[in-house]
Amino acid sequence: FETGDLTGWTTAGGGSDVTVQPNSNGTYTAEGCDGTYLFNSYGGDNDHTSYVKQTIKGIPNGLYELNVKVTSFADRYVYIIGNGYHDKVATTQDKGVFHEATLYFLVEDGSATIGAIGGNKGGGTEFIHYWADQGCFFKADHFRLKRICDVPHGRLKLALDEANATTLDAFGQINLDLSSYQDAYDNKSLTTDGKAEVTAIYDALQVAAKVQKTAGADM
């Protein structure tokens, strides 16, 4: 946002304060701002504001890492978006401090749409995909996009990340050996499109979940 305006970015809804603002102005200042300006989404109502997004074309296909600085009021959520993927960050401090958010997503057609939006109405945990006036107030700054690997290994990483993060109710994390798939990702040794490996990971995850549920029921 260092042009001082919304050059290259799209917003919708909100009002005159849904725009780029100088961090030097105490009304908008947020600790951790990179450079001189930041995006501010206030549209006259803290619970119904806007989004900000940008489409980048002509980039190599692959897995990308998106890093963004976001903030809102304390104990609210802000979502960052990359193509059809999204993830949320909880703002544990008030709007004067930025939080770092990271998202991994695939680019398969040479185009990446990245952006941010506040959690739904009042900062809730529901993701509202680019609906004007539906997300809560937020600020954003310093969008950074980095290519990590090709698409097949990207598919594998996304599946591994999801499986490794999966928990099942009160019985803790699912016991699942994914070492062979992790090795394939680490060594970038796939010779396929990665889809069969992803299917196998999800199939194994379902089996492990059933085993854990059965074991928990017998306790």
Image: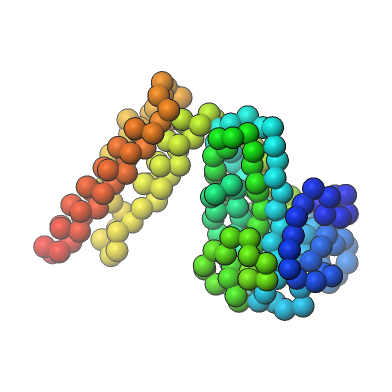
Closest to the observer, 90 or 203: 203
Give 95 or 138, whichever is nearer the viewer. 138
**Residue visible at 67% across and 53% down?**
115
Vertically, is 69 above or below 55? below
From where the camera sits, is residue 140 visible?
A: no
The x, y position of residue 167, in whole percent, is 33, 56
Would you say residue 164 is visible in this rendering?
yes
Name the foreground residue: 92 vs 115: 115
Name the quadrant of the C terminus: bottom left
Q: Left of 26 or right of it: where is 176?
A: left
| Left/right of residue 172 with respect to residue 17 in the rendered view | left
Spot occupied by residue 63 in the image (x, y as percentages of width and height): 55, 36
**Horizontal and vertical percent position of residue 90:** 57, 64
> So how many labels did they put on this image?
0
| Residue 22 image-quadrant placement | bottom right
Q: Residue furthest bottom?
A: 45
Q: Residue at x 37, y 46 (%)?
A: 164
**Direction from residue 72 to residue 173 in the image, left or right:** left
Furthest residue in direction left, as rendered: 218
Question: In the visual, does 195 lie left or right of 131?
Answer: left
Give the residue at x 86% y 55%: 5
Quarter-wise, where is residue 20 in the image? bottom right
Q: Position of residue 8 (x, y in %)?
A: 79, 48
